[in-house]
């Protein structure tokens, strides 16, 4: 002792310790909630979107009686497509100028008999949709079962070709967008920036191409990517002011996109353990594809075709020819060689090209990138490496297209042009409209625009969250990249500010290669059939009495057709057509 009091030993105050413990507990809970929200903590498979998928089984081909029924179904759909093509001469989206049937005695009668032409179109539409549903008995069986016999790929291809041909030679139907394509392409061909000038400013109010553009789009710049307008500029230089020739070439472009879908979809389906004809029936023979991508001449066909083709090329590099992620392990993974890098880079370029038609498809790079990161080990470093590689490819390709085309990057500023339309199929839009209308009824005034400015950003955040969840699930191996991509696109479509009927295909087409359960197929088939039937042709203004009269005539005609074919077509499930879910050899489950 040195005569000095020993210094007291400092102890933490009980309140301070409790506060630190509370903070640590809150931090742990927050971290756990965050991991759960992002899907980092794997939950039971039955509580994830993985329940949408089940491997399909190998089954024999059709027997003699079923082949006879298939021939009748094929003829039924072809007859409906021909009726629609004929009706389009009167109520299709014919050009204001250079109408080839205007004044023609026989063909011109359809333009003067709007009610009759509309009834013919409705009846033809019902025949095509009915034939597609009947064809489904030989592709997927019942919505909750599996077919005992399945048609072959060649049988489905011939059926699809037979249904496409009449619509591919008919005037545009259900949309006037192709005339906007022509006008915007001509603006680019004249050296004017289509991302700053609309048809009226770029071509003049009296130009024949401007006159065919719907009034709502005459003063708006182009919302499409530079690749599409670069191709369109070439078409404009080739066809000039010849509207019919321009429409034909744009339809060939749409058909090329459908051909890419038909090429890629069955290959992707095999990677998912799904029969190619099942995927093609829902994703390519779908009435939305026939009526809107082919009949409506929409550039979504090119976007989807390039996106799916790029995904297939990249997955071929990652998993090998026909390989599946759930069937590959560290011991049987093929070596990643120069050919694989070539396929990987080529596929990334093709996906980027699709995003230069419409930007939405660029998210496909993220899902294939997560699959690539998992192939490289699944670590955070692998994710960064994959993101850096694909990001460099995407940026370089986009810059090359922007500079080579001379169109630059003004399209980034025009992506929201379509938001001027208020679509009843968009969840945030319909919620905003209904709520705004409720305010009017309550005497609070019309606040629809203000509500839309709230609901649409919230929907965008939700869609982004779902996309991130699907990316994480892909990186962790819980979901196939094709399925995760389809689910993310479904969220984006449903929560998009504007949803056109053909936008549904952004989700339906990729999901057709993976999602086989009734919880997906039932609403997908129902939406496809109902929406295809409800959309009206765009070639004439119809009065209410004309629509009702045409609909009644179409119903009567279809009822008579049903009565005449009730014993020759499989309107009801029959032995040998479909059966409840059955066990069997899974469809190509190995690589």
Image: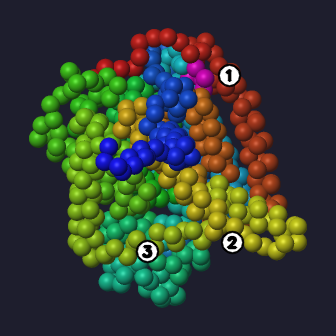
**Counting other residues with Cα less than 10 Å from the Cα at mark 1, is it few (<14), some (14-19), or many (20 or more)?**
few
Tell me the distance, in whole angstroms, between the alpha carbons under discs 2 and 3.
Answer: 22 Å
Instruction: Identify which residue, 162 or 496, lies in the foreground.
Output: 496
Instruction: Identify which residue, 502 or 13, lies in the foreground.
Output: 13
Badge nearest the viewer, 1 or 2 = 2
Residue behind mark 1: 572
- Name the residue rendered at 35%, 25% in the picture: 326
Q: Quadrant of the N terminus?
A: top left
Q: Quadrant of the C terminus?
A: top left
Instruction: Identify which residue, 437 or 198, lies in the foreground.
Output: 437
- Name the residue rendered at 46%, 69% in the picture: 415
Number of on-image labels: 3
The answer to whether residue 548 is left or right of residue 130 is right
- For marks 1 and 2, the one nearer the N-term is 2
Check disc 2 and report its element: helix, strand or loop: helix
Instruction: Identify which residue, 138 or 415, lies in the foreground.
Output: 415
Residue 155 in which image quadrant: top left
Residue behind mark 3: 413
Residue behind mark 2: 450
Residue 65 percent coordinates (x, y): 54, 16
Q: Magenta stretch: residue 441 in it?
A: no
The answer to whether residue 305 is left or right of residue 505 is left
Q: Please identify the residue farthest to the front as the structure is shown.
A: 3
Is 367 rendered above or below residue 329?
below
Is 78 rendered above or below residue 216?
above
Badge nearest the viewer, 3 or 1 = 3
Residue 241 in which image quadrant: bottom left
- Name the residue rendered at 54%, 25% in the picture: 46
């Amino acid at each position: 002792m040195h005569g000095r009091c020993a210094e007291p030993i400092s102890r933490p105050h009980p309140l301070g310790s409790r506060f630190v413990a509370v903070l640590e507990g809150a931090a742990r809970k927050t971290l756990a909630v965050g991991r759960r929200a992002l899907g980092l903590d794997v939950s039971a498979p039955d509580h994830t979107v993985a329940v949408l998928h089940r491997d399909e089984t190998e089954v024999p081909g059709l027997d003699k009686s079923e082949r006879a029924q298939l021939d009748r179904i094929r003829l039924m759909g072809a007859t409906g497509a021909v009726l629609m093509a004929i009706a389009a001469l009167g109520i299709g989206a014919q050009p204001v100028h250079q109408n080839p049937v205007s004044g023609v005695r026989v063909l011109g009668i359809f333009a003067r008999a709007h009610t009759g032409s509309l009834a013919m179109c409705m009846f033809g539409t019902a025949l095509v949709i009915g034939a597609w549903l009947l064809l489904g008995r030989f592709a997927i069986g019942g919505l909750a079962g599996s077919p005992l016999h399945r048609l072959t790929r060649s049988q489905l291809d011939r059926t699809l070709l037979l249904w496409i041909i009449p619509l591919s030679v008919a005037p545009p139907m259900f949309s006037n967008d192709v005339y906007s394509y022509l006008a915007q392409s001509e603006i680019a061909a004249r050296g004017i920036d289509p991302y700053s000038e609309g048809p009226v400013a770029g071509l003049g109010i009296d130009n024949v191409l401007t006159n065919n553009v719907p009034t709502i789009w005459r003063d708006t710049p182009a919302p499409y990517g530079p690749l599409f307008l670069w191709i369109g500029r070439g078409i404009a230089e080739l066809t000039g002011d010849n509207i019919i020739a321009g429409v034909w070439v744009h339809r060939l472009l749409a058909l090329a996109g459908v051909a890419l879908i038909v090429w890629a979809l069955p290959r992707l389906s095999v990677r998912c353990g799904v029969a190619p004809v099942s995927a093609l029936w829902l994703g390519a023979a779908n009435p939305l594809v026939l009526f809107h991508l082919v009949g409506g001449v929409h550039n979504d066909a090119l976007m989807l075709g390039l996106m799916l083709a790029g995904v297939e090329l990249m997955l071929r590099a990652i998993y090998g020819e026909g390989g599946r992620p759930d069937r590959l392990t560290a011991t049987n993974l093929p070596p990643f060689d120069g050919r694989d890098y070539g396929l990987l880079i080529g596929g990334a370029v093709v996906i980027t090209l699709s995003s230069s038609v419409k930007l939405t498809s660029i998210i496909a790079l993220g899902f294939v990138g997560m699959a690539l990161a998992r192939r490289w080990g699944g670590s955070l470093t692998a994710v960064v490496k994959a993101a850096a590689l694909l990001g460099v490819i995407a940026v370089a390709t986009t810059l090359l297209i922007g500079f080579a085309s001379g169109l630059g990057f003004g399209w980034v500023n025009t992506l929201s042009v379509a938001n001027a339309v208020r679509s009843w199929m968009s969840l945030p839009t319909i919620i905003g409209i209904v709520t705004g209308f409720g305010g009017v009824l309550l005497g609070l005034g019309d606040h629809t625009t203000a509500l839309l400015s709230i609901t649409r950003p919230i929907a965008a955040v939700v869609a982004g969250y779902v996309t991130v969840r699907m990316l994480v699930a892909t990186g962790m191996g819980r979901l196939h990249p094709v399925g995760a991509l389809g689910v993310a696109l479904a969220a984006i479509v449903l929560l998009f500010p504007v949803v056109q009927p053909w936008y549904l295909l952004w989700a339906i087409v990729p999901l057709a290669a993976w999602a086989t359960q009734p919880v997906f197929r039932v609403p997908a088939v129902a939406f496809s059939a109902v929406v295809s039937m409800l959309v009206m042709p765009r070639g004439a203004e119809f009065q209410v009495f004309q629509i009702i009269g045409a609909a009644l005539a179409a119903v009567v005609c279809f009822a008579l057709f049903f009565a005449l074919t009730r014993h020759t077509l499989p309107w009801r499930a029959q032995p040998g057509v479909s059966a409840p879910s059955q066990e069997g050899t899974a469809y190509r489950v190995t690589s």
